[in-house]
Image (spheres, rainbow, N blue to C red):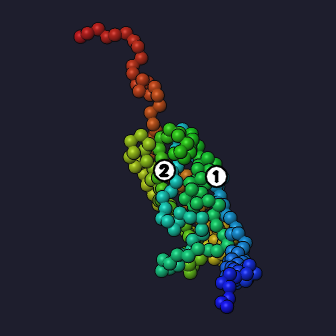
Amino acid sequence: MRGSSVSSPLIDRACLLRRVAPVLVLAALTGACSSGPAPATYDLSAPMSRIRGASGVQVLVNEPAALQQLSTQQILVKDASGSVSFIGGGQWADNLPRLIQTRLINTFENASQLRGVSRPSSGAVADVQLISELRRFEIATPDNQAVAEISVKIVSDQNGRIVNGRIFRASIPASAVDAPNAARALDEALTVVMLDIVRWVSGSQLPRREEPGDAGSQSQAPGKEQAPT
């Protein structure tokens, strides 16, 4: 008599467990490997320093343009050959160009006599805009120098003309290539750059948008008409 082809529930369950067990073990190992400590988060400073000049001018500060390797929260390391890596265990508090834009606005607010400073999304009407590019923000090895470099253009908001342009750079030694020391040195380098930018903008001859009624102010005051000659 031929044996029955119907398997018992106990045998089916044992086979299922043998198939599933390796998957469960792999998932447990993966979870154990990914359960390390979260990276520390580092902010950037907005220095406090009163700077004279450019009173009455309103400025819009755009988010700096940047290459993809700088458009991140990671802390960058670049060696002499140009090879790029990132420091583990630490990250910036926000996407780097957006964070620098915010701290540069804060520095203008803290330091200058400008009438107002904001970002373009605020809808404010400005006299000039700052168009910038984040060129470098890294720990350069093997010298372990924190390098911050930003190019800035002052652009008339009324006609789009470039009024002035300059590249700002600062370098500060980092005592070690780890997250706390790298973040501290880069913050100090950026502080130097941002104060230089504020001094430069505040000391420049900036165009001003005509206020409503300015055109009318040029008209002559009413007076006696001159007799025809």
Name the residue type under label 2. Answer: Leu
Query: Observer-nearest residue: 210 or 205?
Result: 210
Look at discs 1 and 2 and give the one toward the viewer: 2
Give x and y (percent) for residue 87. Answer: 62, 74
**CB atoms at circles 1 and 2 under 8 Å apart?**
no
Give x and y (percent) for residue 118. Answer: 56, 45
Query: Observer-nearest residue: 2 or 49?
Result: 2
Name the residue type under label 1. Answer: Ser
Residue 116 figure quarter: top right
Q: Is residue 97 above or below residue 145?
A: above
Give x and y (percent) for residue 215. Answer: 41, 27
Tell whether 62 sits left or right of 189: left
Labelled disc at residue 172 = none
Q: Is residue 23 above or below residue 38?
A: below
Q: Callout 2: few (<14), some (14-19), or many (20+) C-alpha neighbours within 10 Å?
A: many
Toward the left, the furthest residue is 229
Q: Quadrant of the C terminus?
A: top left
Q: For the residue labelled by badge 1, is the local secondary structure a helix, a strand or a loop?
A: loop
Toward the front, the furthest residue is 1
Give x and y (percent) for residue 192. Answer: 59, 61
Toward the bottom, the furthest residue is 1
Q: Callout 1: few (<14), some (14-19), or many (20+) C-alpha neighbours within 10 Å?
A: some
Q: Name the residue beneath numbered marker 1.
A: 49
Q: Is residue 21 above or below residue 199?
A: below
**Mark sitting earlier along the chain (1/2):** 1
Labelled disc at residue 130 = 2
Tell whether 3 sits left or right of 207: right
Q: Please give the name of the residue rendered at 55% of the width and 52% of the height, measured from the top-left corner.
A: 198
Q: Please give the name of the residue rendered at 58% of the width and 74% of the height, measured from the top-left corner.
A: 86
Q: Please give the name of the residue rendered at 59% of the width and 57% of the height, measured from the top-left corner.
A: 99
